[in-house]
């Protein structure tokens, strides 16, 4: 039995599907009831909650590998990066008590305790907790993850389909290295088989500028939008206004700073194989047809974690 946090979401779903393809039994720790989800009939479900350690320990009983994708994209209400760190620390402690053999933890490229960005500082703090947990571990650090049901690339496509103008902050020369969610899942599941403690970057074979990424998406969806380069503060103002209309958070100042700092690029040889440019060209017909809300997916109507 392997346990995956968030198997009805994005990265967790890909990991669960890869495990099932390899003949593994899968349980998910989730806040989501998903009776209509095709995956629900194929895996066990237990509640992801951090208030009942005994219940969490029971949910992890008999687990070989825990695949941890739990994190928060941004602070919202009482949900903060600090709280996410504490929750993950509890999950690791309970996993060891439950006799879990190995943990595969999904992090991010270029985490640092000295980062000015809370997201990357928090990820570094959790990595330290994983390495000090006493569990056998693999830490997997994805770059910019793309695939069906993702938020970022889909919503770029959504904007390019509907707006006459699509703004990019600054000159757009900052770099990204997209990796497919299927490649991330394969890397994670392969990493579960070993006993050695490892840290792996999950990055795709192409490194492109953000401007190039937006233009690739625009071409794939046959967008007529004019791509413009605006000051960062103006792009953030537009994102806030659009977020208010959508009742969502489109982009935060920290997320944009991470993009502009080329934080989603690996310095190691790429382990991912799927080409972003090929994938986007093949999926342009369906991409961005509907808006994907981060708050609806991961904050409403669930209890704050």
Image (cartoon, rainbow, N blue to C red):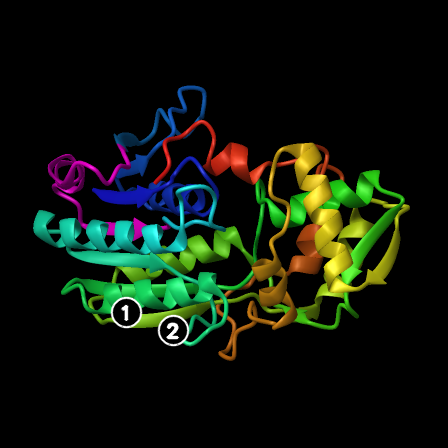
Marks 1, 2: nearer the viewer: 2
Q: Which residue is mark 2?
A: 113
- Expressed as whole percent of the image width and height from the top left, the position of residue 10 reads 48, 43
Look at the numbered disc 2 and give the secondary structure of its residue: loop
Q: Residue at x 60, y 43 (%)?
A: 249
Q: Residue at x 17, y 63 (%)?
A: 133
Q: Residue at x 45, y 25 (%)?
A: 37
Q: From this viewpoint, is residue 184 visible?
A: yes
Quadrant of the rendered image containing residue 232: bottom right
Identify which residue, 56 or 113, lies in the foreground.
Answer: 113
Q: Residues within 10 Å of mark 2 (few under 14, many from 20)?
A: some
The magenta segment = 47-69
Mark on residue 128? 1
Identify which residue, 236 or 134, lies in the foreground.
Answer: 236
- Expressed as whole percent of the image width and height from the top left, the position of residue 109 reads 47, 68
Q: Quadrant of the C terminus?
A: top left
Q: Earlier in the sequence, mark 1 or mark 2?
A: 2
Quote the CA–CA distance across marks 1 and 2. 10 Å
Q: Quadrant of the N terminus?
A: top left
Instruction: Say if the magenta span includes residue 21.
Output: no
Q: Are marks 1 and 2 in contact (CB under 8 Å)?
A: yes
Q: Residues within 10 Å of mark 1 (few under 14, many from 20)?
A: few
């Amino acid at each position: 039995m392997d346990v995956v946090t968030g198997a009805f979401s994005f990265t967790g779903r890909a990991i669960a599907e890869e495990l099932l393809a390899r003949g593994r039994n899968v349980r998910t720790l989730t806040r989501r009831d998903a009776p209509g989800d095709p995956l629900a009939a194929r895996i066990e479900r237990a509640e992801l909650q951090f208030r009942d350690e005994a219940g969490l320990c029971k949910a992890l009983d008999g687990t070989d590998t825990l695949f941890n994708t739990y994190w928060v994209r941004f602070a919202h209400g009482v949900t903060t990066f600090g709280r996410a760190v504490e929750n993950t620390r509890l999950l690791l402690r309970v996993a060891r008590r439950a006799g879990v053999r190995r943990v595969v933890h999904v992090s991010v490229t270029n985490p640092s305790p000295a980062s000015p960005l809370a997201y990357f500082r928090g990820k570094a703090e959790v990595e330290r907790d994983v390495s000090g947990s006493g569990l056998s571990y693999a830490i997997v650090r994805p770059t910019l993850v793309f695939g069906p049901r993702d938020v970022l690339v889909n919503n770029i496509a959504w904007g390019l389909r509907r707006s006459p103008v699509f703004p990019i902050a600054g000159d757009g020369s900052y770099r990204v290295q997209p990796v497919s969610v299927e490649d991330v899942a394969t890397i994670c599941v392969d990493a579960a088989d070993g006993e050695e403690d490892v840290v792996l970057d999950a990055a795709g074979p192409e490194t492109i500028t953000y401007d190039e990424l937006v233009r690739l998406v625009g071409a794939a969806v046959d967008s007529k939008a004019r791509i413009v380069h605006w000051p960062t503060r103006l792009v953030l103002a537009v994102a806030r206004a659009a977020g208010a209309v959508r009742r969502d958070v489109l982009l935060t100042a920290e997320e944009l700073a991470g993009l502009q700092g080329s934080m989603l690029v690996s310095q190691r040889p790429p382990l991912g194989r799927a080409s972003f440019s090929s994938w986007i060209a093949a999926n342009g017909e369906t991409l961005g047809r509907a808006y994907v809300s981060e708050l609806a997916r991961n904050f409403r109507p669930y209890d704050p974690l």
